[in-house]
Amino acid sequence: MIYPLDDLIAKSDFNLEDLNLVSFAHSYDPEGRLIGLPDGVGFKALFYNKDIFDLFGVEYPTGEITWDEGMELAKQMTGERNGQEYTGLVFDEPKIPLEQWAVRAIKIDWA
């Protein structure tokens, strides 16, 4: 059952600061309400091959990068080299970019 919990939490002594995943839980509701409590966490990591960066003449990323920066790197490293096709970025699940904290998936009406 989906039920907004914000009012119940406000009336209780429950401290949301004890949970580091609350913003993630808010992201599941289009209105940003807290409709459930997080029960776990999954982590994703981005790995890259320095040899492929060298092959395409692209500098290695340093520190944190945004999705926009990552997608730009992927564009620069997608193509053919020495008879081999390369794809700059591949996700095992297409929803991975939406799993960052507090990002809401939206429905797009293409009509």
Image: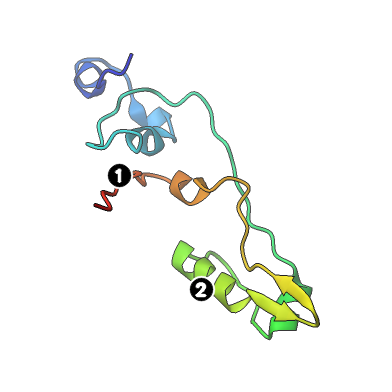
Instruction: Name, please, the residue furthest toward the bottom.
Output: 57
Q: Is residue 50 above or below residue 92?
A: below
Badge 2 amino acid: Glu
Q: In the image, is 18 to the left or to the right of 57? A: left
Q: Is residue 76 above or below residue 6?
A: below
Quarter where residue 57 is shown: bottom right
Q: Where residue 107 is drawn, which disc sits there?
A: 1
Location of mark 2 (residue): 72
Q: In the image, is 8 to the left or to the right of 22? A: left
Residue 72 point in image, percent of width and height: 51, 73
Does dot 1 land on a helix, a strand or a loop? loop
Please report the residue visible at 65 percent of the width from the left and 67 percent of the height from the top.
Answer: 87
Residue 89 point in image, percent of width and height: 61, 63
Q: Where residue 91 is drawn, which disc sits there?
A: none
Judge by depth and name the residue closer to the eye, 41 or 82. Answer: 82
Label 2: how many residues lie within 10 Å, few (<14), some (14-19) or many (20+)? few
Q: CA distance from mark 1 to mark 2?
A: 25 Å
N-terminal of the pair, mark 1 or mark 2, is 2
Judge by depth and name the residue closer to the eye, 1 or 84. Answer: 84
Residue 78 point in image, percent of width and height: 63, 74
Residue 9 point in image, percent of width and height: 26, 20
Please report the residue visible at 40 percent of the width from the left and 37 percent of the height from the top.
Answer: 24
Badge 1 amino acid: Lys
The reply to whether the C-beta atoms of the residues labelled 1 and 2 are less than 8 Å apart is no
Judge by depth and name the residue closer to the eye, 34 or 92. Answer: 92
Q: Is residue 43 above or below residue 55?
A: above
Instruction: Name, please, the residue furthest toward the front.
Output: 111
Label 1: how many residues lie within 10 Å, few (<14), some (14-19) or many (20+)? few
Does dot 2 land on a helix, a strand or a loop? helix
Please report the residue visible at 53 percent of the width from the left and 48 percent of the height from the top.
Answer: 94
